[in-house]
Image: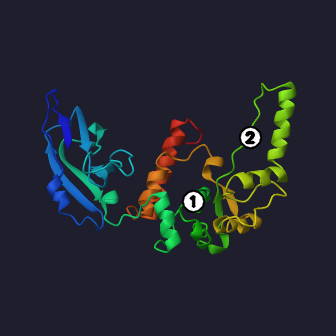
Amino acid sequence: MVEPAAGDGSPGRRHGLIGAAAAERGDRDGPAMLLRREFVLPAAPVRARLYVSAHGVYEMELNGERVGDHVLAPGWTSYHHRLRYQTFDVTGHLKAGGNALGAWLDAGYLTTDFASSKLEAGIRHLADGTGAHYPMLTSAVGTPRLAVPDKVSDLGFFALPGDDAAKNGLTVWEPAGVYIPKTTTGAKLDAARRFLAFVASKDGCDAMARATTPFGPFLVKGCTLPADVAAPIKDMQPYFDSGANSPALEFLSPVKGPSLEQITVEVGSGIRKAADGAALYDQDVKKQAQQLGLPGW
């Protein structure tokens, strides 16, 4: 709903885009719908706000320009009980005369076969053969050991494919660092250094492997994975042996883009095409870099 204010400061006419009943007639499991409404303003508004919500996900345009930078809006809720809505200042988007308001509307989470599942359920689907693959970090390997211990050997791992199979590599979430505060001195500093030396030793690796479930190859020279480690972890080792791996983006750049998670969900679930998602992510990164005041952006 667009709520412009008249030039004299008095409330203007409210323009609704489309009613809920009309939207409900769409094919819930079909492609995204493009909704459009044209309207005329006698003068450019002094102030105008756009209120938006939807069952599913939306993306708004006003006079050919995207409104806001939300992804997967209005956000997940239990649709039958509560709906979020967003408010946008669209004063600069409107003009005197003809205007056009458009909305891409997709069923999103409301799709009956939306490809989503909780972690434990996803693991079970993999183990019993009803699921083909489930994107996740290998740190989740501890879950099938608890949920489906007799099926762990049936699971495996592969890195997400790229454009060139010969260059396909593994993105690695680096292990946690262990630090000593600069204020540590004397005997405490000596003890802390001995502990760090133990952590970065074969004895330290063996102790960690006995106490926890390894979720990746060790990065300490001389350390090897236990023979009984889960298959998905073993499947990672060749990527390390061949050097076909690199740290995750978080370890390489301070800029990630605040909407990356939502963009990848849109692409992975078929709401947005991959090329469009990449272009949107470029905009997302640029916005964050500018907010951080980084040079060159």
Q: How is the image coloured?
A: rainbow
- Residue displayed at 46% across by 62% down: 121
Can residue 252 be seen in the rendering of this structure? no
Structural crowding at the residue carrying mark 2, measured as other residues with C-alpha within 10 Å and reported as few (<14), some (14–19) or many (≥20) = few
Structural crowding at the residue carrying mark 1, measured as other residues with C-alpha within 10 Å and reported as few (<14), some (14–19) or many (≥20) = few
**Image check: 278 left or right of 254?**
left
Look at the picture and state if 200 lies above or below 13.
below
Q: Quadrant of the C terminus?
A: top right
- Residue displayed at 85% across by 58% down: 222
Q: In the figure, residue 141 lies in which quadrant?
A: bottom right
Residue type of the residue flagged with mark 2? Val
Which residue is the site of mark 2?
178
Coordinates of residue 175 in the picture (x, y in percent) = 69, 49
Circle 2: element type:
loop
Identify the mark nearer the N-term, 1 or 2: 1
Which residue is the site of mark 1?
146
What whole-number distance in Å separates the C-alpha atoms at marks 1 and 2? Answer: 28 Å
Residue type of the residue flagged with mark 1? Leu
Look at the picture and state if 96 lies above or below 201.
above
Can residue 165 be seen in the rendering of this structure? yes
